[in-house]
Image: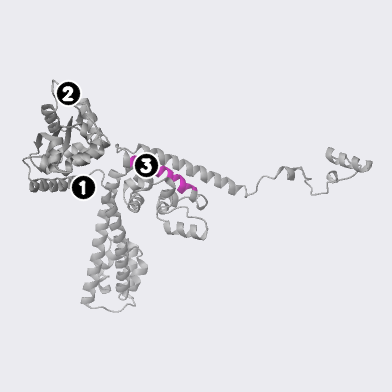
Amino acid sequence: MLILYETPAGYALFKVLKEKKLQKVENIIEAFSSEDSASKVVTLQAFKKFKDTKDALLANDKLIKGLFPKTLKKFLEKNAINDEVQEKLAVSDKKLGKVINSDLGIECVHGKTYDEIFRGIRSQLDHLVTGLTDTEFKTMTLSLAHGLSRYKLKFSTDKVDTMIVQAISLLDDLDKEINNYMMRLREWYGYHFPEAGKIITDNLVYTRVIRKIGMRTKAVDTDLSDVVTDTIEKDVKDAAEISMGIDITEEDETFIMNLADQVLELNDYRDSLSEYLKNRMNAIAPNLTLMVGELVGAKLISHAGSLINLAKYPASTIQILGAEKALFRAMKTKHNTPKYGLIYQASMVGSANGAIKGKVARTLAAKCSVCIRVDALGESEETEVGEQCKDYVEKRIKYLENANLNNNVGGGFKKPHARAESRPSNGGYDGGNDFTLGGNLPRMNQTFVKRRNDQ
C-alpha cells in the first residue's frame, strides 16, 4: 500500500512496509513513537518538491477546491502506477481520492485508521523526508500560509459586501456631520443676516447664497440668478437692506465662508459616495436594490454584517431588522411587538396606508428574503426575480388598499346574525316565542309539560 501525503514543500509518496501492523490504532501510535520504529513501518518512495511559493499556492488551492493538479497527476503517473501490481493508495481527502480513481484508475482508501497513519507521519516528517531541513520546511510552511491568506482575502470586484458596509456607514456619518455644520452655519451667519434663514429653507441653497453674498451689504450688487429664483433673489436683497442683524468683521466673514466651503465639499463628496453606493449595490445585490432601493438594501446588509448573513435570516427577522430594542422591550413588558424595522424606510411601506403598513411590511420582507438569497447564492446578475417579486408586492398593496377602502365605505357595520334577522323588524313584541302550556311548543317542551300533568 502507498500513502500520498501533501506537505507545504511538495508531494510525498510513502510505501508501507508492514501493512498488518497498521491495522489497529494502538499499533499505529506505537509504530510512530520514535524515528527508528517509524522508518521500519513506512519508507519514502518519491518526493516532488515545489519550485516556489507560487507553485505551492496554485497546487494547494486546487486541492482545497477538490481539483486534481497537473503536477500531482504527473507525479502519481510516474511513481504510483505499476504494470505488474496495482497497489492501493491512501489519501487524506475523500474528494481527492474519487478524482484520482476516476482519472488514473488507482484504488484509493481513506478512513479513521488511515487518519492515524497520517498523524503519525506528520509527527516524524522531518526524519522520513530526506533532503529537507527543518528550517527550510518551516520557512515554506510560513510562506504558503501567508500566500493562502492573501489569496482568500484578495479583492474581488463582483461580490465584496464589505465595501457596501463601509460606504453606508460613512454615508450616515456624513449626514450627521453635514447637519451639524449647517446648524452651526445658520446660527453663526444668522447673527449677521437672520432674515436669510427664513427666506431660504433649503440648506444647500442657503449655503451657496451666503457663499456668494458674504456680508449682507454686498447682497444688492450680487447676482444670485444661478442659485435661486428671481422672487427669492428680490426678497433676499430687500431683506438685506433693512436687516436687524449685527455687523461682522472681515475676519468673521473669512471663517464663516470657510465653514460654508466645508459644507459644500462634504455635500459634493456625499453625492459621489451615493453614486458609488448605487453602482456597488446594483452589482452585488441587484434584486434587493430593485425591491427596496440601494440605501435601504445597504442598511440591511450593514446591519446583518454581510450579504451571506442576511441571506440566512428568515423573512420575519428581515421584517423587524433594526428594531431589536423595541422587540425585546415589547417581549419583556408583554406588549405588542414591532411590525417593521429598517424596512419601514422603503417607499412601498412608507407610502402605504397606516392600516395596512404591517401587512405590506410582512409581504415585502418575504419577497426581499427571496431576492437576497438569489443575490447571495445565485450566479446570474439579472433582475428577473426582483421584477417578479416587486410586481407581486404592488398587486398585493392594491388589493389591501381596495379591501380597506371597501370596509371604510361600508361604515364598519357587520352583517347581522341569523337570530337577529329572525326578530321583528318593527322592534315590537313577538309572542310566538313565549313559553305557554297551550301554545305550539317545541317537542322537548311538550314532553316536559305532559310528564308534569301526569304527575
How would you rate the neighbour count of disc 2 (Cα within 10 Å): few for under 14, some for 14-19, many for 20 or more? few
Residue 153 circle label: 1
Distance in Å between CA atoms under marks 2 and 3 = 52 Å
Residue 34, visible in the rendered structure: yes
Quadrant of image for the N terminus: top left
Of labels 1 and 2, earlier in sequence is 2
Q: Position of residue 355 (x, y in %)?
A: 52, 51
Magenta segment boundaries in residue numbering: 359-375
Give the residue type at disc 1: Leu
Q: Quadrant of residue 406?
A: top right
225 with respect to 291 (left or right):
left
- Please say if 217 is above or below 154: below
Q: Position of residue 79 (x, y in %)?
A: 11, 28
Query: Does 155 appear in magenta?
Result: no
Of labels 3 and 1, earlier in sequence is 1
In the rendered image, which residue does mark 2 sit on?
86
Q: Nearer the viewer, mark 2 or mark 3?
A: 2
Residue extending farthest top? 84
Give the residue type at disc 3: Cys
